[in-house]
Image: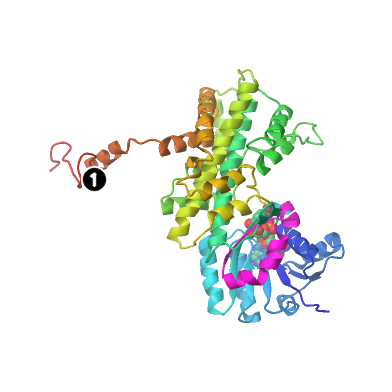
Amino acid sequence: MNTMCDIGIIGMAVMGQNLALNIARKGFRVAVFNRTQERTREFVNTRLQGEPIVPTHSLEEFVSVLGKPRRIMLMVKAGQAVDEFMEALFPLLEPGDLIIDGGNSFFQDTERRLQEAEKRGLLFLGTGVSGGEYGALHGPSIMPGGHREGYELVSEILERAAAQVEDGPCCSYLGPGGSGHFVKMVHNGIEYAMMEAIAEIYDILRKIYGLSSSAIQSIFEEWNESDVASYLVEITGKILGVEDPETKKPLVDLILDAAEQKGTGKWTSQVAFDLGVPTPVINQAVIARSLSSFKEKRVLLSQIWGRKNDTALCFDSKAKDALRQTLFLSMVAAFSEGFHLLQVASEELQYNLNLVDIARIWKGGCILRARMLSSIQKALAENPLLIFAASEFTQKVKESTKYARQIVKTALEFATPVPVLSATLAYIDSWTSASLPANLLQAQRDFFGAHTYKRIDRPGTFHTVWEGETE
Ligand code: NBP
């Protein structure tokens, strides 16, 4: 019997442990290693139930138990840890061996690492893994990019470990270079936007309509059977139902309202700016997290402003429907921005991405999984400029826009900030406006900087002396 391992995983924190168990339960033999040995020991002692998992205690031992060509997956903290492990692995590996970085690495780091691996004759895959702890164990969405020959070496393992949906495993080779991590970064940007949209709807429900957490819980549970059905709506319902064991209050009411972030949302916005792709909904979600983190200053200013949270509106089924339609619109806008960014990146960075396939592998296992992804697959197959403009969506988006205007207006009247919901409207209204006030911007630019402008009534480039000569 071959006792060599089919794959090795480095990094035994939550993701590495669960992925190792998942792969082993599919019948593959998995070697594991962690910088701090205690973590490996604890994993072996507390979680193994006869799975074919081989704990190792040095990198040399780890490499020695792997079948050739060796397949090694790093599930460590993104950044320096990945570089350190790669440096340590290089002298132990042979040409044709494969390193997979399964963490949330920045795609430009992945491009660099791929070249470093290539110089040594090694294969490299930068692979996004979405689904958190549960997904890693039961089937995540896996987004690999890099050397195609590398993917061939692990396709069977990754595709069997991935979540399965009606049209296949949620894992597919995405493209060359850092494309896998690029797609995962955009996935996280969309995730930020959807989370913030849900949070803003929750805020309206509790502050303007005065609903309790348990009443809001029922609404999200109901919505999870509708056009906004998704993992994030589902977990929101569950979260709102959890009681703090000590105080017996809803736990969510006791959590400090200061959001943290690890950077993938910010990278999405930064890259979108670099590529000239408008992503206001995602950007506002990133900004909302940063602003929330200034808790003490907000408390001080709210006292100076004399802000009170008087609830005033009566909640009824019309309001509930309008809020659902508003959430639907923000979700579609977030996906539109994300797929637009992927489309432009695919051309600019020569990733040759298959957007329909990306929508498919997001349908299961990952944080973005949502009922609307089946419609998004169809919309993308039409190859529209933007998803919300595809025939699959136009009518419904137009309809939802009317409701979103009412909701955003109400929120503004009550000074309840809804940056993502209002950015959603601004995004759709801007894209569907034949005329924007950029004519005035061009005039201003020409006034102070002689930047020139174009006219609508004749070709050419023009400059005007807008007032008397300055010299
Ligand atoms: P963490 O991101 O918390 O990283 C912990 C692991 O990194 C441990 O194995 C730790 O080893 C190792 N590590 C660190 Br920290 N610094 C190191 C260094 N300088 N050298 C060597 N090893 C080092 O783990 P995670 O939450 O399981 O996530 C793993 C990757 O997957 C990350 O890139 C993460 O962004 C990504 N991801 C996470 C999730 C999630 O839900 N958690 C979801 C999707 C993707 P030690 O035990 O010796 O400290």
Give above or below for 93 relative to 214. Answer: below
Determine the residue positioned at 66% across, 35% down. Answer: 226
Q: Which residue is mark 1?
A: 449
Quarter of the figure with the N terminus: bottom right
Q: Is residue 443 left or right of residue 251?
A: left
Displayed quadrant of residue 225: top right
Q: Nearer the viewer, residue 345 or 39?
A: 345
Q: Nearer the viewer, residue 30 or 207?
A: 30
Magenta-colored stretch includes residue 159? yes
Determine the residue positioned at 59% across, 63% down. Answer: 173
Determine the residue positioned at 56% across, 53% down. Answer: 356
Q: Percent from the top left, x then y, of residue 470?
A: 15, 41
**Type of residue at label 1?**
Gly
Q: Nearer the viewer, residue 166 or 153?
A: 166
The span picked out in magenta is 134-162
> How would you classify the magenta stretch by its main secondary structure?
helix
